[in-house]
Amino acid sequence: MEFDYQALLHNSTFCLVPRGRRLGSFRFLEALQAACIPVLLSNGWELPFSEIIDWSKAAILGDERLLLQIPSVTRSIDHDKILALRQQTQFLWDAYFSSVEKIVLTTLEIIQDRISSHIQRNKLMWNVLPGGLYTLPQYSTHLADFPFYYLRLGRSPAKKFTAVIQVLSPLISQSQPVVKLILAVAKSKYCKQIVVLWNCEKSLPPKSKWPSTPVPITVITGENKAMSSRFLLYDVIQTDAVLSLDEDTVLSSNEIDFAFIVWHSFPERLVGYPARSHYWDNSKGRWGYTSKWTNEYSMVLTGAAFYHRYYNYLYSHYLPADLHNVVDQMANCEDILMNFLVSAVTRLPPIKVTQKKQYKETMMQQGTKTSRWADPDHFAQRQTCINSFANWFGFMPLIHSQMRLDPVLFKDQVSILRKKYRDIERL
């Protein structure tokens, strides 16, 4: 009787891994890849990367001298434990063993931790999502600084944010959208500071041109005109939360406050208003990009979105220069690349808050030469970007979602006094 070996692996709960010609066996990695729990029967075998990986969470360590006891051992494991073991095999395979590149990088990172023992990663970082390759020790030596571990540590982000506004147009009058945006952001009770990235070709206007606000405004200019500069890790940003904004975004203080409260519950994700989606185009054999309003989305635009500042670090130091060059050459797609990065790290979709047609309509009606939305090649460029990014990541990390979070009583016919965010529905 013939068996399909690969099908048998994927349909098995436990896979025996006896020693091969030496202590190890190639069946070990085959079992990991197939989400089959390895049952190791090779006394004295030092498992790969055992210095940082807790294999007791993904494998059964048997004794080859007690082979007949293995069936009773596996039958005694309850279903919840089996599920946890199988999930861990998939995490470890994907994080450290699924490519030669990841095996090499993991090896080099372990060596780095040995050399720089004072900043080595906590073992927890290696054994839970997103894994040690994404929690780079150069950013911090403390678990509490990374958004992925807040719930596990019983910690919440500080209740303040930094708004980072990218400005491409000259500041001429106090009636410009960017001035109204600054005033709306400054009115938020959660805003700690506003950072303006002056990427305009015109010279910086005097301080008297900027509106007076209850929070400090810091202007960064002349250092980097590239589109990807909005996601650099600027020293002035001291808060966990960053609110990324385009100069012509229209948001009220109520909308900003609500989005921040939502982000506070999901600090590892992108949380924003305007949403977009990707799809597979069978006729062209490639990924497509759409702004059509449907029941699903897979991206939120960073023209109005909250995220954790650690992603600034990953964007600057983890992503290669080639991807940054794609963004800068097209003067486009930096928001798509940030969505790719966050979804690749978290394996989770972004979160859209409150239906926001006003953002879409404002951008589509703006007919200035500086508006990227008026460029006929805009969507073609973004489709090119999506395929370039997917090729580099080696898979499509974007995940579709049908969830949208609105304030309670948002559209209910109740007294306005009962509503915390009273102005949202009138926008």
Image (cartoon, helix red, strand yellow):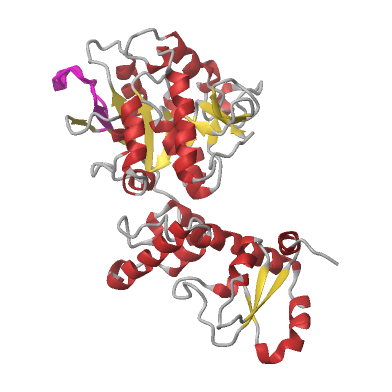
Give the percent coordinates (x, y) of residue 59. 62, 73
Q: 95 and 214: which one is in front?
A: 95
State yes or no: residue 390 in magenta.
no
At horizontal 35% and vertical 31% (from top left) the residue drawn is 327
**Where 343 sits versus 142, above or below?**
above
- Tell me if I can see residue 126 in this picture: yes
Q: Quadrant of residue 159?
A: top left
Give the percent coordinates (x, y) of residue 106. 42, 63
**Where 152 sits versus 23, above or below?**
above
Q: Which residues are magenta?
A: 195-215
Q: Is residue 266 left or right of residue 35?
A: left
At horizontal 53% and vertical 17% (from top left) the residue drawn is 357
Q: 367 and 284: which one is in front?
A: 284
At horizontal 65% and vertical 87% (from top left) the residue drawn is 63
Q: Quadrant of residue 113?
A: bottom left
Give the percent coordinates (x, y) of residue 134. 42, 55
In the rendered image, which quarter contains the N terminus? bottom right
Q: Quadrant of residue 404?
A: top right
At horizontal 38% and vertical 26% (from top left) the residue drawn is 332
Give the percent coordinates (x, y) of residue 14. 72, 71
**Residue situated furthest bottom in the rendering:** 65
**Where 144 sits versus 240, above or below?**
below
Q: 413 and 225: which one is in front?
A: 225
Q: How many marks overall?
A: 0
